[in-house]
Image (tube, helix red, strand yellow):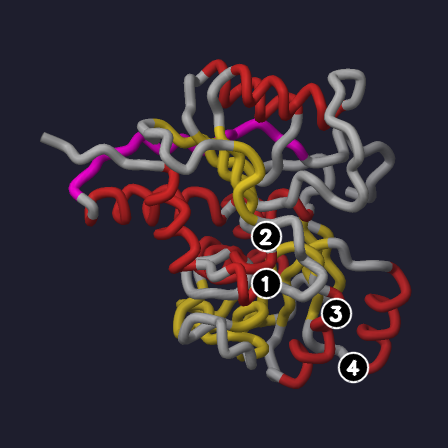
Amino acid sequence: MSEILRLSDVVVDLERRYPPAAAASWDTAIGLVVGDPDQSVRRILLAVECTEATAAEAVELSADLLLVHHPFLWGGVTSIAETTTKGRVLTGLVRGGVALYCAHTNADDPPGGVSDSLARTVGLRDIEPLVPSASPAAPEGAGTGRIGSLVTPTTLGAFAEQVASVLPATAQGIRVSGELDAEIATVAVCGGSGDSYLDAARLAGVDAYLTADLRHHPATDFRAASPRPFLLDAAHWASEWVWLPFLAEQLAADAAARGATVEVHVSTLRTDAWSATFGAQG
């Protein structure tokens, strides 16, 4: 007979993998937002963020927990009245018996986290942190971003096509800066906004750097200084969504280690902010 899995059990296992103490100092909105730690958990829905759509999906699925990457209660929220979006979402989750947990920057850097998952998804091997973590709270092997090698060297254009094929589709697609026929063998990645680590990618000596939210001036100045690394810019949501299938496996394994079973579902709702692109160069 399977053991009962409690919400508190899921939180303990999750925070063992992704310690809240390892989060960025400004990232104070992580952890359990809604839910009774003693409630049983039979079904979990994973999503990049809690929106009206993903919250409704969790309720419709009869999930006991909606586990997301992006924090939900940023800044000075003073009301959860249903006249507000956050109020409608939270009261809907409470009525539906769905707990909400957010794991943000504490899930970016550890092994098995966001950047590690992105590196594995795009086919890198011999993976190491781009910037090793200096936090005493971080798990062994943690660090910002990842660097690794391609199994077989390829062209920048072919790698961009590969990235586009394994990341979920978005209106943006994959933007590229560099000669498409240039050969590349080593790549750095950083899930989410990564232009703060452009210099780290250059110091690592890689041929290409894949991240999201690259801005015009930093990217232009970076490329003007040296021909490599080439740049690949994915949609923020897509670069982080790839963590969710890996997280699903982790949650199932942690439940099994407790003698329990849990259904883990990955939301495929696209919550990327952009819905279409017009006039893009072919």
Of the two numbered discs 1 and 3 in the rendering, the one whose residue sits closer to the viewer: 1
**Direction left: furthest residue:** 1
Residue 135 at what x, y percent from top left? 55, 77
Question: What's the residue type where badge 3 is placed?
Answer: Ser
Distance of label 2 from label 4 (alpha carbons): 33 Å
Q: Which mark is residue 23?
A: 1
Q: Which mark is residue 226?
A: 4
Distance of label 4 from label 1 (alpha carbons): 33 Å
Magenta segment boundaries in residue numbering = 259-271
Residue 74 at what x, y percent from top left? 74, 44
Instruction: Say which label, 1 or 3, has the lower sequence index.
Output: 1
Residue at the spot x=82%, y=40% of the render? 280
CB atoms at circles 1 and 3 under 8 Å apart? no
> Pointer 3: what residue?
196
Residue at the spot x=53%, y=42% of the render? 32
Question: What's the residue type where badge 1 is placed?
Answer: Ala
Residue at the spot x=70%, y=77% of the render? 228
Left or right placement of residue 171 versus residue 10 in this view: right
Residue 196 lies, with reference to residue 211, above or below; the image says: below
Left or right placement of residue 62 versus residue 5 in this view: right
**Local SS, label 2:** loop
